[in-house]
Amino acid sequence: MDLFSLSINHHTAPLEVREKIWFSEEEARSSVHRLKGKFFRECMLFSTCNRTELYAANPRGHAGAADLSGFLIEMKGAGGSVSPDHFVAKDSEEVLTHLFRVAGGIDSMVIGDIQILNQVKEGFRFAREERTLGPVLNRLMQHSLRVGKRARAETSISEGAVSVSYAAVELANKIFDDLSTKSVLLVGAGKTGELTLRHLISKGISRIKVANRTADRAQEIVSTHGGIVVPFGQIDAALSEADIAITSVTAAGPVINAAMVARAMKIRKRDPLFLIDLGVPRNIDPEARRVDNVFLYDLDSLGTVVNRNLGKRADEIPSVEAIVKEEVKHFVSWYSSLQVGPTIQELLTAVESIRSGEVQKNINRFNAEDRELVDLVTKRIVKKILHQPIMTLKQQSENGSVRGEVLEHIHALREIFGLGRQDYDE
């Protein structure tokens, strides 16, 4: 099987190395042309923050992994930071297993990463638009996307929050029936706090207040996400009007104490208050959780939620591996059909089925003495029609024509006559 892959990822290299070999969309589009022109008849390339991967089929020569990794390093001008040892090369069925595991989310730094399937899809899209895909990688694209979709539909590999910001929103959804009717107070301008705010906004929250020691930074956040700025000294009053409060402040001690929370709850008439403490050291006095109807989560408790969800995802890995094995088997079966002998036999069987079916349907229109002749004549017609394409395929195979060209002709023939579609059709 003339398949090849080359990968640098979080298993093989640290971030400071991976970032040197990251390809933008424009660079990926340009690179696949150069790779196809020099090394392969088919190829695609994609990059994420955790990996850069090349997939190719039908080599033009005998370039090895060192040649290809060197080529990618040279294109990025990363010779001083990246070496061929940072790459892992695979071929044949190993390529299928690797790509399908990536698309299924079980080779990601975060198990069940929901972004990776879109990134794989984008890589194939770039290559298809640049016309560097052929019959093999086009089929590989169909199977890899199918693996990703099946993994998410048939398992729980992508369910449950696996970041503290997502975990906070997941908890908020459990505490409040409808987040779109709630209000949020952001205290501090830390990145994780703002990210949590952004996730809450995506759930429909629109009433936002932001308090920060530096008013200009608070205004930046309001300009981006909406809402109003609250003076840092008025957190106490703002707390009574918020359903959710997020703190992300660098401070020696709590900026919200238990007494402030108790006063706020008295004004709120005991309506639930969800406190998300993202500060280190903690920004909210742990005693605040003793106040009735107050739900306080800090980084440790949110981390527990994340770890629990990661554990559930890890339990789904065997189920995704089973899907990967099944799809590898499907692809190998399809690839095996791209041989001259099986294709010719399928073509003859398919056309004979059509011929005999039509003869049987119309045989009663002929006299009894002519029926044998009709059968014989139609067989001769079919044989003459198929003679040239069959001979061409045989000659190409026997003369040692370029494997890629033979595959393209076989693929075209199978597509035109619909051979094998009953086995796998996307």
Image (tube, rainbow, N blue to C red):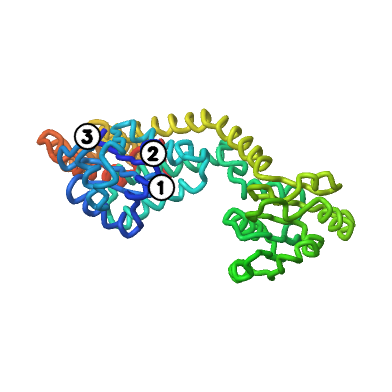
Q: Residue at x 75, y 47 (%)?
A: 296
Residue 310 falls in which quadrant of the image? Answer: top right
Q: Quadrant of residue 183?
A: bottom right
Residue 100 or residue 249, whichever sits in front = 249
> Which of the labelled discs sits on residue 311, or is there none?
none
Residue at 68% over, 65% down: 210
Q: Residue at x 22, y 41 (%)?
A: 58
Q: Is residue 37 left or right of residue 307?
A: left
Q: Say which quarter of the image contains residue 409.
A: top left
Tell me, yes or no, whether the two marked residues, 3 and 1, touch with CB atoms within 8 Å.
no
What residue is at 39 percent from the left and 38 percent from the top?
99
Residue at the far front: name it. Answer: 252
The answer for how far apart the CA atoms under marks 2 and 3 are is: 27 Å
**Which type of secondary structure does the marked residue at label 3 adopt?**
helix
Amino acid identity at mark 1 = Val
Q: Label 3: how many residues lie within 10 Å, few (<14), some (14-19) or many (20+)?
A: many
Position of residue 63 relative to residue 218, above or below, is above
Quarter of the picture containing the N terminus is: top left
Q: Residue 93 at x, y = what percent?
A: 33, 31
Image coords of residue 349 (percent x, y):
30, 33
Question: Closer to the N terminus: mark 3 or mark 1?
Answer: 1
**The residue tagged with tag 1: helix, strand or loop?**
helix
The residue beneath circle 3 is 340
Residue 77 image position (x, y, % from top left): 25, 52
> In terms of sequence position, does the residue under pointer 2 or pointer 3 come before the other?
2
Query: Which residue corresponds to mark 2?
Result: 99
Mark 1 lies on residue: 120
Name the quadrant of the C terminus: top left
Q: Secondary structure at mark 2?
A: helix
